[in-house]
Amino acid sequence: MFGHSPPAVARALATQAAAGLTTMLPGELLTDVGALLAGTFGLPRWQLALSASDANRFAIRWARAVTGRPRLLVFDGCYHGTVDDTLVDLRDGRTVTRVSLLGQVHDLALGTVVVPFNDLAAVERALASGDVAAVLTEPALTNCGLVPPLPGFIEGVQAACRRHGSLLLLDETHTVSTGHGGWARLHGVVPDLLVVGKAVAGGMPCAVYGFSDELADRMQAAKGAAPEGHSGIGTTLSANLLALAALKATLAEVNTPAAAQAMARGAERLQAGLQAAITGRRLPWTVTRLGARMELQFRPTAPRDAAEARGAMAGDVEAALHLWWLNRGVLVTPFHDMLLVPPMATDNDLAAVCAHFDAFLGALI
């Protein structure tokens, strides 16, 4: 998101590597990192993990511990890494374990319920059972195709959680590119738990999860009431010295409001250029954008849920476009037609992407 080797992160890693890679004790950078995380994302308490998968896994365990409830609610088409509880699909109105999983033994539907994204009524019905510990969601679906939330949807989910005693856990691993502080900070939503991975430490294996003071007290009480032994939360390498150094450098020098503004300006230009090419060729397609992230979708408007997003995919066209761009010096993530604009992208870079796209459409039709 900020480039493949941000200079500030590279310097911090080199300096820290000369002084120590990891220890079994907290590093001195923890207080600085905690203050930077609180200032960036707006929650006061933080824990570290090695990946967003781990952070989500730990946050789910905490949610079940403090609420005493067994079930998790996720949305059809969700992606939260390799967390077992989230590897489920909605099929004919039922929650089912994904058939693609390798080595799966347990029925994941026993602990998870799936409902469609942007469907508040379905959320209400699921939470009314009184056994859902938390709703885990991205602010916008990103892995099944970009599906933005309808106005007020995430706020409605949070209100439903409060009415029914469930926690709201937002996974901003992908949507942190919405702007400085992520989607939730920009929209004034303060979740009970917040997970950020991938770019938060400039590409080093690191993720974080934050939570409120009130929830921290409940977590402390749950831990204190449990028997001695491993909690299933945390690993030896969580908060290692290299991760802390990269995290501090990224938050202080790389993931800045100025960088976010540059990304937003570039993304607006890129979206406008791509959409102009589509309109000029009279194609019923759209470019759906969320901050610095956008996706070409083969439908006239942004999808409302995962089913609509899947129905708009055209794998052969996507593969051809990736190859077309690659052969002209433009490398994009080989995943749908998703583009993410970094702060160092120039007007010439963006113009080249759009020009090659327009030429592709001319050759295609």
Image (tube, rainbow, N blue to C red):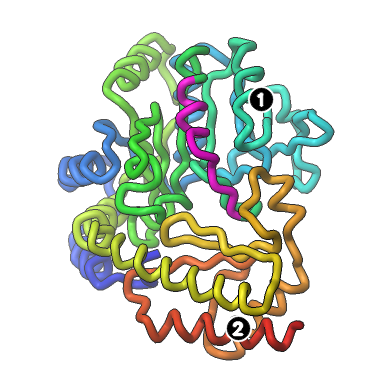
Type of amino acid under label 2: Asp
Residue furthest out toward the bottom: 328
The residue that appears at 63% across and 31% down in the rendered structure is: 119
Residue in front for this viewpoint, 360 or 84: 360
Can the viewer see residue 27? Answer: no
- Residue bearing mark 1: 122
- How many residues crowd mark 1 within 10 Å: few (<14), some (14–19), many (20+)? some
Type of amino acid under label 1: Ala
> Would residue 140 appear left or right of 228 to someone viewing this image?
right
Q: In the image, which is nearer the foreground, mark 2 or mark 1? A: 2
Q: Is mark 1 on a helix, strand or loop?
A: helix
104 up-or-down from 64: above or below: below
The residue that appears at 54% across and 47% down in the rendered structure is: 148
Q: Is residue 149 magenta?
A: yes
Q: Where residue 358 is drawn, which disc sits there?
A: 2
**The C terminus: image quadrant:** bottom right
Residue 12 position, x and y percent, is 21, 64
Can the viewer see residue 152? Answer: yes
The magenta stretch is 146-159
Residue 293 position, x and y percent, is 47, 60
> Would residue 313 appear left or right of 346 to someone viewing this image?
right
267 up-or-down from 186: above or below: below
Distance, label 2 to label 1, CA atoms, is 41 Å
74 up-or-down from 268: above or below: above
> Is tag 2's residue or tag 1's residue first in the polypeptide sequence?
1
Q: Where residue 102 is drawn, which disc sits there?
A: none
The residue that appears at 42% across and 40% down in the rendered structure is: 195
Residue furthest out toward the right: 92
Residue in front for this viewpoint, 110 or 49: 110
